[in-house]
Structure formats: C-alpha cells, structure tokens
Image (spheres, rainbow, N blue to C red):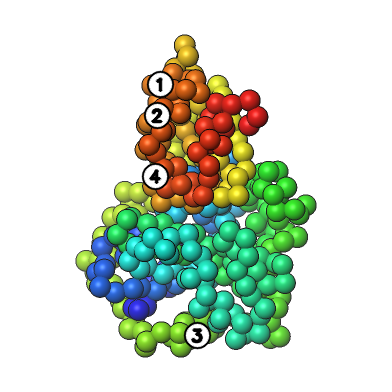
Amino acid sequence: MIFIENEGNTNPKLNLALEEYILRHFSADNDYLLFYINEPSIIIGRNQNTLEEINHNYVEENNIHIVRRISGGGAVYHDFGNLNFSFITNHDVKSLNNFKKFTAPVIKVLNNLGLNAELKGRNDIQVDEKKISGTAQFSTGKRMVSHGTLLLDTDLGEVVNALNVKMSKIQSKGHKSVRSRVANISEFLKEPLAIEDFRQLVLEGLYEESEPFETYHLTLEEWSGVHQLKAEKYDTWDWNYGRSPKFNIHRTKRFPVGEIDLRIFVEKGYIKEFKIFGDFFGKEPVEHLEQLLTDIRYDHSTISEVLKDVDLNEYFGDVQKEEVIDLIYGEDA
C-alpha cells in the first residue's frame, strides 16, 4: 500500500480529480491510499440529478462547492470537519459492492478509539445506530476506487440546509429527519480531537493493518495532469450539473439497492429521450441503457425484448429485471 500525500489541498474539484487521476494513471502493481479534507461542498453521486438534490439558493448564498463524483450513491455534504478516505486497488468482482471488505480496517481503527462502530445497511458505518460514515465504489473494469467519509466534527445543520432530502429516502430509513440519524465521531470521544490529529490516528491505525506504507508525493508532471483533468471535467457545468432532460413521463421507485428515477419523453408512441437518475451503485454506466431504450416503441413487449439479454445488475446492483421493466412501463410504479 502506498499513501498518496495530497499536500493539504482542500478544493473538492482538485481532490476528486486527484483521486481519478491515481485510479486511471498510477501503476496497477500497487494499491494506494488517499486522504483529503474538503472545503464546504456537496458531492453528488454519479447518477443523480444535481438540481433536485441541492437547496440551490442556499448553496449559492453560502458559496458551497457542487461537484459530481465518479461513484454512485447519494449526495453528501463535506466540510473541514470531515475526513475522506480512498482506497485505489485492482478490480475484483468479489470486492465490488463489498463495502464490508474495505471498511473493515477503518472500523477497526474507530473501535480502537473506543467507538462501537460497525457497517450497517447498504454502505453506512454506524455507531449506536447513528451514521458517522458513508461509502461508495467505482470500477473501470481493471481498477477500482472504494472511498468514504468520516464525520469527525461536521456542521450537521448544514447537511440539512444544503441538501434536498427526498421523502422516499426518509421513509425508507424509518426516521423523520436526516439530523436524527447522523452523528459526528466527536460526540463519542472522551476528549476533543482536531481533524489533523484524527487524520494521523487513522493513518497510523491503517499502517498497523498492513505492511509499512510508503508515502508518495506527486511529481510536477503528475500534478499538471491532475489540474488538466480538473479543468476539463470537474470544473465544468456539464459534468457537475448536466442537462435537465425533457420528459413527459416520470417514474420512480425505491428498491433495496437505492432509488431508480426515470425521466422518459415519449412522442408518437416512441421513446425520444430516456434518462436514469438515482442513488444506486452499479458497475456499468447507465448511459448504455439510456441509448438502448431510445428510439424504440414505448410498450412492454418492445422494452422487454430490448432488455432480454441485458444484465441489469451490472447497472443497478441486485434488482429483478421484471421489476425494472414494470417501472419503465407498468401500472404499479
């Protein structure tokens, strides 16, 4: 394992560009660990509709960064009280969506700090039924990134202020509010702990779980590549927001894997636009499905035929094909 030093950068667009650059350009002979702390920001899941996830006026008034990440899952709030960790490894089909595997060493570090931490639900680390970390994954097919948050002393009021939390998500969690089920790690510690000291404790704890780490500092040429990726992707409106689709049919359902939200524009019986949003985790980009389902007749048999040989688990996780088809074209969605 090689620890990548991010040199104290707190710009979320730069940190996410750094993470992706390591994923796509660093040697597959090694595993990498990256830590970063971001300025106040909302990090949007790969498949989410940004404008519907954020409180736009509040975000604008408070200069909160909006950045889309390459992994699936839901929107999260970052600030200087939140430590982000990222493991970059070779792709392993058994490890993809196996959040238990890569969170285990992090949970052990938290346990050593006196927290009763454990993995719960799809991808949350909890202490006494309170969420203190959310995790997500992305795979290129050859390499994968498994990353998460650690809420040490985040302004949890801002989580509620900056995000639009959908009622379907609140209902699925069985709680009345986000604030009631999220907590800071600091609430469970006997003594106050600065984020820099917490970062060092987590790093030392992970050292103990592995062979001694090498610390790596990027070259000027590598940083130039990171900044180029930031400029071409993470700085752009198209990546962070994207075009709001034209639609006249809106169908949404929360599955165990997460919410699937469909926007479909049908004209003269044919699907002219098809857009998939949601906080699910999948390996393959949903753009492939969107293309397959465009310019076909909007009827059950045609949709079923188009999807006949498609493994939808690659796009959404563990779902039944008929349930998705019924969501696209059915009576009970």
- Residue type at mark 4? Pro
How far, Cα to Cα, is label 2 from label 1? 9 Å
> In the structure shown, which secondary structural element does the residue marked by tag 4 occupy?
loop
Disc nearest the viewer among 3 and 4? 4
Mark 4 lies on residue = 285
Q: Earlier in the sequence, mark 2 or mark 1?
A: 1
Q: Earlier in the sequence, mark 4 or mark 1?
A: 4
How far, Cα to Cα, is label 3 from label 2? 50 Å
Disc nearest the viewer among 3 and 2? 2
> In the structure shown, which secondary structural element does the residue marked by tag 3 occupy?
helix
Residue 37 visible? The answer is no
How far, Cα to Cα, is label 2 from label 4? 17 Å
Mark 2 lies on residue = 306
Contact (CB < 8 A) between labels 2 and 1?
yes
- Residue type at mark 3? Gly
Q: Which mark is residue 205?
A: 3
Q: Position of residue 229 (x, y in %)?
A: 31, 54
Q: Which mark is residue 155?
A: none
In the image, taking residue 259 as reference, residue 291 lies left or right, namely left
How far, Cα to Cα, is label 4 from label 1? 20 Å
- Residue type at mark 2? Val
Q: Of 30 and 83, which appears nearest the observer? A: 30
Q: Which mark is residue 296?
A: 1
Disc nearest the viewer among 3 and 1? 1
Q: Position of residue 93 (x, y in %)?
A: 38, 60
Query: At 38% from the left edge and 36% from the top edge, which residue is drawn?
Result: 309
In the image, taking residue 4 as reference, residue 267 lies left or right, namely right
